[in-house]
Structures are given as C-alpha cells and as structure tokens.
Image: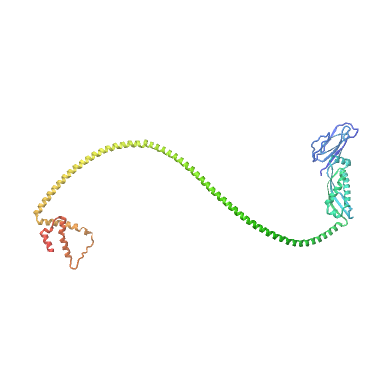
Amino acid sequence: MQRSTALFGKRPPGHGQCCAASFPLEQRSFPSKKLPSVRQSTQSPGTLRGAVQGGCCGSDVKQYVYGGWAWAWWCITDTQRISLEIMTLQPRCEDVETAEGVALTVTGVAQVKIMTEKELLAVACEQFLGKNVQDVKNVVLQTLEGHLRSILGTLTVEQIYQDRDQFAKLVREVAAPDVGRMGIEILSFTIKDVYDKVDYLSSLGKTQTAAVRRDADIGVAEAERDAGIREAECKKEMLDVKFMADTKIADSKRAFELQKAAFTEEVNIKTAEAQLAYELQSAREQQKIRQEEIEIEVVQRKKQIDVEEKEIIRKEKELIATVKRPAEAEAYRIQQIAEGEKVRQVLLAQAEAEKIRKIGEAEAFVIEAIGMAEAERMKLKAEALQSYGEAAQLALVLDALPEIAAKVAAPLSRVDEIVVLSGESSNVTSEVNRLLAEIPASVRAITGVDLTKIPLIQKATGAQA
C-alpha cells in the first residue's frame, strides 16, 4: 500500500533569520495546489506526504502542502507531517447482544483515510498532528466498533445475517459523520463474519433449512400441479397458436405465391420487353453499323475505282510504251515483210501457174498423142478383128472369161458353203446349164460383145435349150 504523509508547521516565535532549507514533497494523482511563497516542481515517485509550514519573519500563518513541495526556513519554520495513505481497519465486536438478546460476534473490514480538503485537513491536523499512524487507527477503530455495537443492539439476528450489505451500509451512514468531524473519510466498510457461541445461527439455519425443505416440497407439489395445469393450458395455447400460425403461414404462403407469380409475370414481361427493346436496338445498331460499313465500302470502292482507273491509265500508258509502240513497229515490219512475201508468193504463184500451164499443155499434148495412138491402135485392132473373123473374136472372149469369172466369184470366196435348193424334177446339171446360159448376157453387159451371134456359141446355147 502506498504510504503518504502530510507536513505541517510554523515558525517558532523569537527565532532570527537563517538560511533556508528545502524538503521534497511527493506528488499525488490529483493536481497539487499552489500556495503563497511556494514554488511547485515535478517530484520523483515515492510516498505521498503533506506538510504544514509557518510563515517567516514572525508570521503565525499555517500553510498546508500536499502533492508538491515548499521552502522551509531552517531553524525558523516549524514543519510537521501527517500520513495521507489509506488505513485498513478490522473492527471486531464480541458477544454483543442483538435486539432479541442473542449474543453475536461480528468482524468487519474498513478502509479510511484523512481527507485532503483544506478545512477537513486542518481539522485532522488539529486532532492527530504529532501522532503516529497506529494511534490514528486506534481512534478511528474504537469509533467504528462503538457504532457497530450500538447498531447491533437495534437489529435482529436475521436482519444482520441475511442482509449484510444493508447492515454495513447502516454502519457507514451512522459512523461517517462522527469520523468526518475528525477529518477522516470512510472509503469502504464491509461485514467480514458473523457468528455466535450458542449455535443460534446454526439452529436458525437448521430450522430455516427444514422450513425451506418443507416449503420446497409443498412448492414442488404445487409447482408440479400448476405445471401440469399450465402445461395443458400451454399445450392448448400452443396448438391454438400453431393452428393460427399454420393458417397465417398458409395465407402468407398463398399471398407470397400469388405475389411471386405476379412479380414473376411482371419480371417476364419486363424481361421480354427489355429483350425485345434490346433486340430492336441491336437491330438498329446493326443497321447503322451496316449502313456505315456500306458507306465505308462505297468510299473504298470509289477509292479503289479511282485507283484502278489510274492503274488502267498507267497500264495503258505502259502498254503503249512497252507493247503498242513496239507492236506497231513490229506490225509495220511484219506488214512490210508480208507485202514482200505477198509479192514473192504472187510471183511464185504466177511462176507455178505458168509451170502448171506448161505441164498441162505438155500432158495435154501427151494425152492427145496417147489418145490418138490409142485410137489408132483401136482402129487397127478393130480392123484386125474384122480381118480375124469368128475364131479371133472367140479367142478374145475366151481370154477375158477367166478375169470375168474371177470378178464374179470374188464374193463367193468369202462363203464357206453353198447349198443349192431345187425341186424334185430338177437336178444339178440343169442348174449348171442355166448358169452357163446366162453367161452371154453377162458378157454382153460387161464387154458389149454379143456371144450369141457367134455361130459356135449359138450352137452350144441352142443345144442346151
């Protein structure tokens, strides 16, 4: 516990001046007060002290200093100290009779201290200055024990034992004014223990315990009865509340579903409208974008057409420079060559025509000579044939017959087998004779010679007929 003291003093009369001496005063938790002719400074931690000093030069004025420091004139200023720390007291009253005559022993714990207000501090200094802490404790302890005894005589054992806080509060209220007039403040007072030597409190406890048990059993029975009744009532109320709650829940659920359906329908409508608006706006934006793209394409096409036109012009100029001019020169060269070739071909054609004409004239002359020679040969042959007679003509015909037979039999050379069909009265000889009879007609058709006019042939054909 922190120790604190207060210093008090005054100058003894008749002393002369001497050098001043200073003493430190420890700092408290609250601000220190400034006194005349006192300088305040920060103190090192330590005990809390208060001091009283008298004035100098014959002055009898008392000054109270706490939580600070002051000058004290050595051999001139009289200083005294008093402790300001909290004091713990343990008042004890043994075998004190209560209002019912029961002797009780009561112990308590009290926390007291000297008050620091200037007037009350002055009172405390007048009462306890020059005494030690134990003397102050004894004075306050005897005062508290006296009030404790007087209060015990006015209360019953039950009041003291069962309501200790009220008992302690009553002691504080009664004792505080008396110790306050001594400059002492009661910070706290509590009852520590209450007991007796005749087992009154234990008997009271047993009686009270039995009564409490009895009341508890009765209370349990009544509580069980009331609990059963209350349980049934609560169950009924619970069922009623449950039914009402279920009804409200069903109504709320139905209203919720209806409202939810309405909200869903509204949300769907708004969603569809938003989707439609989005699609419409998207289509508009796409149309705008497409229009812009078309315009961009038109501009690009125009630029491209301009570029292509310029490219065509460039290529035409390039063509003129690289192709047309050389082509014109080549065409002119070819034209000149063609004209020269044409003249050459004309001359060649004229020469060829002249050659052909000359060849034709020569061939015509040869043909004419050959024709004239053939005519002369035929004429001579005819004259010879006329001079040969029938034997010569027959020899010529017979010479020609193998060739005629070969020509007639040529188609038959490609035939594998020939079947001659005839009636019952005919025979192969008659068929051969018929074929031979047809030969003169064939020879006449081929050669123009009528074999039937030859007497030998006439005889042969006549015999066959």
* 131 and 290: which is toward the camera: 290
State how the image is colored: rainbow
- Residue 357: name its quadrant: top left
Who's the residue at 11% across and 50% down the image? 379
Image location of residue 29, percent across then percent down: 79, 41
* 52 and 2: which is toward the camera: 52
Tell me how many marks there are: 0
Image location of residue 210, percent across then percent down: 83, 60
Which quarter of the figure is the N terminus placed in? top right
Residue projecting furthest to the right = 14
Who's the residue at 15% across and 46% down the image? 368
Judge left or right: residue 185 versus residue 401.
right
Judge left or right: residue 14 versus residue 293.
right
Judge left or right: residue 275 versus residue 232.
left
* 437 and 411: which is toward the camera: 437
Which quarter of the figure is the C terminus placed in? bottom left
Image location of residue 373, percent across then percent down: 13, 48
Asked if residue 411 is positioned above or below residue 189 in the image, the reply reads below
Residue projecting furthest to the left = 387
